[in-house]
Amino acid sequence: MTKLNEHLQKLPGNYLFSEVARRVSAVAQAGPERPLLRLGIGDVTRPLVPAVVEAMKRAVEELGREETFRGYGPEQGYPFLREAIARQEYQARGAAVDPEEIYVSDGAKSDCGSIGELFGGGGRVAVCDPVYPVYVDAHAMAGRGGDFCPRTGTWDRLVYLPCTVETGFLPQVPEEPVDLVCLCSPNNPTGAAADRETLKRWVDYANETGAVLLFDAAYEAFITDPALPHSIFEIQGARTCAIEFRSFSKTAGFTGVRCAWTVIPRELEREGVPLGRLWARRQAARFNGASYIAQRGAEAVYTPEGRAQVRESIAYYQRNARTIRAGLAAAGLAVSGGEHAPYVWARTPGGMDSWTFFDELLRKAGVVVTPGVGFGPGGEGYIRLSAFGSAEEAAQAVERLTALL
Ligand code: PLP
């Protein structure tokens, strides 16, 4: 009889968001005095911008006519999109990335998860603590996590890099050698963004040890300080040690449309094999390309109108983040993030644990947040607030929280 994947079976239930949903639904069903304000989920709420909508409409029209119909596209993405990304996201910032090094996909989540297929089972993987759970789950499923310990909430073969107030809520280069490092900047959930010096330390570490950096920059569009890098490829030496994941999800509201990309530079090789070649082979075996409509929509993000419209949506969320951050700070909470990311990371008052504060906010203020401990043990004592709702919700949430505190 066939055997099931033992590693997949070791994954704990999706405790965080299902538990949040369960508690929220209990309160919602009891009929709260005021509508609940949902600052928990990291999904966007602003509609697609007109330039994208028009481009997608044109693409649908093309597919509906015999002369312009298209079937399967290239697995790595259409040249029109790869060229626009290379030019505007990289070359415009002085990072030499070619269209051939860009692999368009249907999401950074799938790419962050699937990239592990390039690597063997034995390597050590380092992850942030707290962490975007996809990296942990994907490597654990592939057998690189070892065993899960319910008591500590950690996997025994993963190396956890604490992201605490002392480390600026970003991971430090570890003492021990590791093979793969999952980095995320601007960071989900802490909202911290790495500067050039920090990324240079990682690049030097990786080039010295042979580690590969898996750099997730899904939130780069939220960076406000022009001195901060948006891509790992703005850092010298990154082309021999890093893979980057990017997405239109949070940048252009594509969470429902689905379009993203991964960059694997030509110089990145291990065991004499270019990883880009291996990824192209993997994609050809498993993936039939992102939808033509989505790619035409994504291309429109790079038109002058598209850029201006998208910038406006991001500015809207950035204002929310500032409202939340400033409001919580004024109410006496220790806050970080929210300056270069759509997430505000706040310390719970009086050393309360994450879930207790979550319940207080939900029951007494009608505000839904995400308990920090759900992102790993290092998130205990924190909550994450998302700026992806409306401006009214952000302002009301601050008012209610201030009244509560
Ligand atoms: N990377 C990070 C850090 C995220 O927080 C998310 C979504 O919340 C993603 C990737 C997923 O991006 P996509 O919608 O492109 O799959």
Image: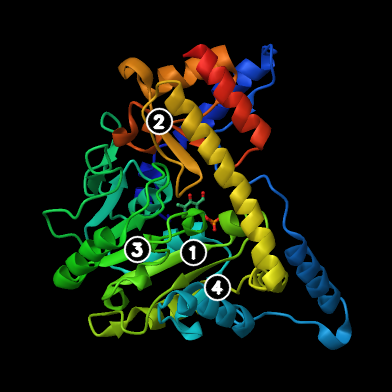
- First of labels 2, 1 by sequence position: 1
Q: Position of residue 82 (x, y in %)?
A: 56, 79
How far apart in space, not on screen, are marks 2 and 3 (Cα)? Answer: 27 Å
Q: Position of residue 369 (x, y in %)?
A: 51, 29
Which dot marks residue 214?
Answer: 3
- First of labels 1, 4 by sequence position: 4
- The residue at the point 31 percent across, 71 percent down is 235
Going by the numbered disc 4, the residue's amino acid type is Val
SS state under label 4: strand
Going by the numbered disc 1, the residue's amino acid type is Arg
Quadrant position of residue 305:
bottom right
Residue wearing tag 1:
246
SS state under label 1: strand
Q: Position of residue 138 (x, y in %)?
A: 39, 54
Q: Viewer-proximal residue, 294 or 195?
A: 195
Residue wearing tag 4:
104
Q: Are marks 4 and 2 in contact (CB under 8 Å)?
A: no
How far apart in space, not on screen, are marks 3 and 4 (Cα)? Answer: 16 Å
- First of labels 4, 2 by sequence position: 4
- The residue at the point 60 percent across, 32 percent down is 394
Going by the numbered disc 3, the residue's amino acid type is Leu
Answer few, some or many: residues within 10 Å of disc 3's Cα (few below 14, many 20 plus, some between 14 and 19): many
Q: Determine whether 188 is above or below 405 in the image.
A: below
- First of labels 1, 3 by sequence position: 3
Which dot marks residue 346?
Answer: 2
